[in-house]
Image (cartoon, grey):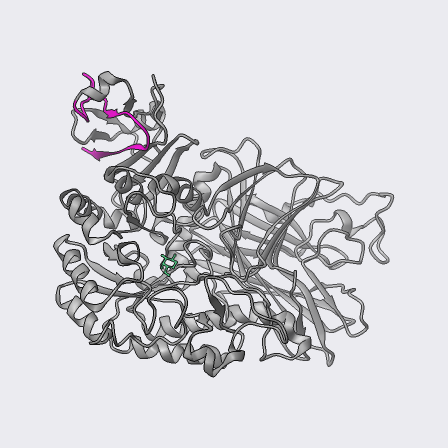
Amino acid sequence: MPTLIQVTADNVFALSNSRISYLMRVSPEGILEHLHFGATISNPETFNAHHKRVMRSLSPEFQDTHRYSLSDVPQEFPVFGTSDYRQPALHARNVNGNSIFDFRYRKNSILKTKPKLEGLPSARQGNSETLEIELHDDVHNVSVLLYYTIYSDYDVVTRSAKIINHSANELKLEQVFSTCLDLPQEDYEVLHFGGSWAREFGEHRNALPYGRFSIESARGTSSAQHQPFVAIIEPSTTETQGQVVATALVYSGNFSINIERNEYNDVRVLAGINPFNFAWTLKSTESFTTPEVVHVYSNQGLDSMSQTFHGFIQNNMSPERFAHEPRPSYLNTWEAAYFDITEEKVFELAKLTRSLDLEMLVVDDGWFEGRTDDRRSLGDWTPDKKRFSSGIPALAKKVKDLGLKFGIWFEPEMTNADSQLFRDHPDWILHVPNRKSSTGRNQLTLDFSRPEVVDNIFQKMDTVFSCGLIDYVKWDMNRTFTELGSAGLPANQQGEVAHRYMLGLYSLVSRLTEKYPDIFFENCASGGNRHDLGMLSYMNQSWVSDMSDPIGRLAIQNGASHIYPLSTYTSYLCPVPNHQNGRVTSMETRFNVAFFCGNRGLSMSIDDIEKDKDDIKQYIQQFKASANDAVNGAFHRLYYTQNQVCWQLSSADEKTLYIGYFVVLGEPNMKFKRAYLRNLDSDAMYKLQDSERLYSGSQLMHAGLDLPYVSVTQDALASPSRVGDEQGLQVLDGGDFVSSLLVLEKV
Ligand code: DGJ
């Protein structure tokens, strides 16, 4: 591996691979200044800082320096109150009660091994080098260690920070961001994603305003409302061109991403734990580690940014054991039967699962004592003896004897007032004294900031897992935090609860995944309420949304694909009318959308399955035949408009191209439409399946592939479906929610 980090004699730090560079320097005053994050700078020793030392009225000069005001200097870890008025990376209260700190450069070291973050998930070493820089405040004897990791094979720089209190006094941390990126003075747009339950990952792209713009969560989860991700882009950016600087947090709890454009058009991006409702006491000799962030740079638009995230996440973040393994096709009991499950019914579904040639049965919510609706028993995790009289291990064994894998649902972080756990330990929930706790879905949140609570849940899950018959666990989480407080912490540490909860959650997840490396874990939080790089560092996939209607899912899957590889999300064929939005779609469209997910399955009642059994069987064969490609192929968004969507999945061996084309509402006399495919072999020929059409790779990329024509005239409706015109162009029966999966094979 080539050397990735260079430190020049003048203390310019250059982290470079053959495509990107991240440059910083130490100013004569000892301030760690930001110089560049973008395309590779080949001679960092000649890099000329752009900063100008000018007299600016109303901008104070930093301490005893001349014409040097931090208010316009790009910095790596700025503080407030010493001439910079922008939001700081660190804000803390010292022993004197003020918040003035002054961190100057002390030393650096290049680490060949990427340090793990204490109690927090982080990207693996891969082909990387790490730079550690120490900044120090002499008055309060506090150090900040900044970590930067650059990879040779991905256009990624990861960052995190560690605050160490070397003094004898206590320090109160009020705001500690993981990163500060001070960008050049350009016009930018901000791209980010969010929505709500069953409509996660809505795409939002706006001009960056003068002032501040922030996205955040104070709900205890990273949230469906805002993805912990932002991309700062040139206004002209498209899928295939434009500069993009993206930031994704490796954290699953309260976060904040703040972007500020000040009077000089300087743009500052801060990302990390949400400072709102956060306060952390750092006692003498203690340290505080921030979550990691992943920064991606691309000068070739959003597709290239996504390819970087996809490869990086799959190879350096997703648990290695299953990162590249084709997922088993499955039947999940949730939309098939909800809480109406018994041992007999599950076994019936298992036999049906087998006869459909699926590979796994997942028993969703409802298998434990008294759980016939959502009002009780979370936290007890004892199988219901009345409805599952032989017990879970025996059922698992029977299911596995059919040749299937066996999966089971848990919601480990929750309890109900009507549960033995809560009766025994009423103070084990997040709550505050003398106030009633609000509920969500009749649930109370267990206080995972307390190690004894985490231990208790570990023991209960361990008991179920230890039968050795569980292949798959769906880990759910169905409410957000209220009355945030812990009976385990004194009054002056209540500001620590939300982050301590995350540390407790991560410790439980890592204990279980380490003890049971062969269990495949799926992350879920009412769908995508916690679909983030934190959870995905322990679990290979997420139930990306409770929206199972294919048309409702188009925006969700399209949005998610900007950051997350297909291997990280799950889908299933749903019943119609759809249970979330009442829409009726064809089985073909349900299949075509589900196809573009890493893991595919089915969740429909026995009666519904029987009605369409032959079609379903045939679609399951296609799921299975493409299972490797869904996990290891390359996904591209060819275009996305409100009414039409087109996606490309290139197979892992690059020989097969799957083109999904979706039309939401039928239009009379539709325009002809082409899709310009990406990343093909220019000289190779590709044959469109079920036709005689041959295209060269260069034609498909530069002149485009003709997409089917959707006809809504009576004439077309009267003609047999799937009849092409004389050139073999597909004509689809008109109407709404029509789709097609075109397959091209390299010849
Ligand atoms: C919410 C999940 O998103 C659903 O898929 C299902 O598992 C239910 N919880 C079960 O309670």
Q: Residue at x 72, y 57 (%)?
A: 31
- Pinpoint residue 540: horizontal percent, then vertical percent: 36, 59
- Pinpoint residue 198: horizontal percent, then vertical percent: 43, 48
Q: Is residue 638 above or below residue 559?
A: above
Magenta residues? Answer: 720-747
Ligand 1: give its quadrant.
Answer: bottom left
Say which of 246 and 105 sits in front: 246
Say which of 139 and 689 sits in front: 689
Q: Is residue 22 above or below residue 370?
A: above
Q: Residue at x 47, y 39 (%)?
A: 302
- Pinpoint residue 615: horizontal percent, then vertical percent: 16, 42
Q: Residue at x 60, y 48 (%)?
A: 44
- Pinpoint residue 219: horizontal percent, then vertical percent: 55, 59
Say which of 563 and 16 sits in front: 563
The answer to whether 703 appears left or right of 15 in the picture is left
The answer to whether 105 appears left or right of 511 in the picture is right
Residue 41 appears in the figure: no
Q: Is residue 107 above or below residue 723?
A: below
Q: Where, by quadrant of the figure, is residue 746 drawn?
A: top left
Quadrant where the N terminus is found in the figure: bottom left
Say which of 171 and 711 sits in front: 711
Q: Is residue 328 above or below residue 647?
A: below
> In the rendered structure, does residue 604 fall within the stretch colored magenta?
no
The answer to whether 713 appears left or right of 83 in the picture is left
> In the rendered structure, does residue 741 fall within the stretch colored magenta?
yes
